Image (cartoon, grey):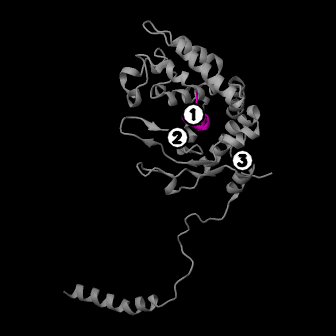
């Protein structure tokens, strides 16, 4: 009983000071600073390289409204965001500037990028690398894994660059739809599109023989088109010929379908946007080789 009495007396002794604190005037400035910050050197670099020349907003700070609330989300690490911004600028924006002209890039390239630290994991064993929304925004995920997956061109392409070109293809398709003839190459056959069953084990090993450049191409005609485009521009001619050769299986031969689809993709880009896809591929791969050779500074935020 004595211990409880001492505790009670101690709490009573604190009441006057607690009361006096409550009478102090409130600070009119809120400590909650959502969407309010002073621009740092990286922000100024983004202004100079994305906002002013292209009207593109590159968001690396976490914003709850930009993320999908159906998934657990993680902010992108600051240093990784700087590297990713350089990669998007040098390998994507500058490549399209070189081949298609700055007017094309300003007109069609997405007006917003939003970075997420983690990928979005689904309950069917797959995860999302990125998404395109409304023809103007690309969400890039898994940025916190960039140091691990940027040491080789193969990994950099698979986890990040292909995703950007894939999602940009969706945006181009939303501007001008691709020909219905593309959908008919696989859609009318028994080896047609599978929707969400594309990840089933029965269809994992023979996608090339069925006429699909990747397993995910089997999902739908729109994903198939974007996969053809993005895989083509991030791999060299020898790789493409190897895929055509691998498509000639013992029981199925998907090489003709792949060649037909790629021909339609090339014609679409040439006739709709005046872009030679081989020239675009050459520009992207040359720039990527320069990055992998350490010839490009991916960390500087100095504005010249």
Q: Residues within 10 Å of mark 1 (few under 14, many from 20)?
A: many
Residue 235 shows up from this direction: no
For the record, the magenta segment spans 156-178
Query: To which residue does mark 2 refer?
Result: 130
Q: Residue at x 58, y 63 (%)?
A: 35
Considering depth in this image, is 124 or 273 the residue closer to the camera? 273
Considering depth in this image, is 114 or 176 the residue closer to the camera? 176
Q: CA distance from mark 1 to mark 2?
A: 9 Å
Q: Nearer the viewer, mark 2 or mark 3?
A: 3
Q: Is residue 269 left or right of residue 61?
A: right
Up the image or down, 20 lies above or below 155; here it is: below
Query: To which residue does mark 1 refer?
Result: 166
Q: Earlier in the sequence, mark 2 or mark 3?
A: 3
Q: Residue at x 69, y 26 (%)?
A: 271
* Secondary structure state at the residue bearing disc 3: helix
* Contact flag, marks 1 and 2 (Cβ < 8 Å): yes
Q: Residues within 10 Å of mark 2 (few under 14, many from 20)?
A: many
Q: Is 95 part of what is drawn in magenta?
A: no
* Secondary structure state at the residue bearing disc 1: helix
Query: To which residue does mark 3 refer?
Result: 54
Q: CA distance from mark 3 to mark 1?
A: 20 Å
Q: Earlier in the sequence, mark 3 or mark 1?
A: 3
Up the image or down, 97 lies above or below 224; here it is: below
Across and down, in percent, residue 224 comes to 51, 27
* Secondary structure state at the residue bearing disc 2: strand
Q: Residue furthest left?
A: 1
């Amino acid at each position: 009983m004595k211990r409880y009495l001492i505790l009670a007396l101690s709490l009573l002794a604190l009441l006057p000071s607690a009361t006096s604190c409550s009478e102090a005037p409130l600070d009119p400035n809120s400590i909650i600073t959502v969407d309010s910050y002073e621009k740092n050197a990286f922000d100024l670099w983004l202004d100079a390289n994305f906002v002013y020349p292209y009207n593109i907003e590159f968001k690396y700070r976490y914003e709850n409204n930009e993320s999908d609330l159906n998934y657990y989300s993680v902010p992108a690490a600051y240093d990784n965001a700087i590297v990713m911004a350089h990669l998007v600028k040098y390998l994507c924006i500058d490549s399209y500037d070189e081949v298609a002209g700055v007017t094309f890039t300003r007109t069609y390239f997405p007006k917003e990028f939003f970075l997420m630290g983690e990928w979005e994991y689904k309950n069917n064993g797959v995860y999302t690398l990125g998404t395109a929304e409304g023809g103007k925004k690309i969400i890039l995920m898994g940025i916190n894994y960039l140091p691990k997956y940027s040491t080789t061109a193969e990994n950099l392409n698979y986890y990040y660059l292909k995703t950007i070109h894939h999602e940009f293809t969706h945006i181009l398709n939303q501007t001008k739809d691709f020909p219905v003839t593309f959908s008919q190459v696989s859609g009318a056959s028994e080896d047609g599109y599978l929707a969400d069953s594309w990840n089933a084990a029965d269809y994992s090993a023979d996608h090339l023989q069925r006429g699909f450049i990747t397993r995910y191409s089997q999902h739908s005609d729109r994903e198939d088109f974007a996969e053809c485009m993005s895989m083509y521009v991030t791999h060299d001619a020898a790789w493409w010929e190897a895929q055509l050769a691998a498509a000639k299986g013992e029981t199925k031969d998907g090489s003709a379908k792949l060649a037909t689809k790629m021909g339609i993709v090339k014609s679409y880009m040439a006739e709709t946007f005046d872009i030679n896809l081989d020239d675009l591929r050459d520009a992207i791969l040359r720039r990527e080789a320069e990055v992998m050779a350490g010839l490009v500074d991916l960390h500087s935020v100095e504005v010249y």
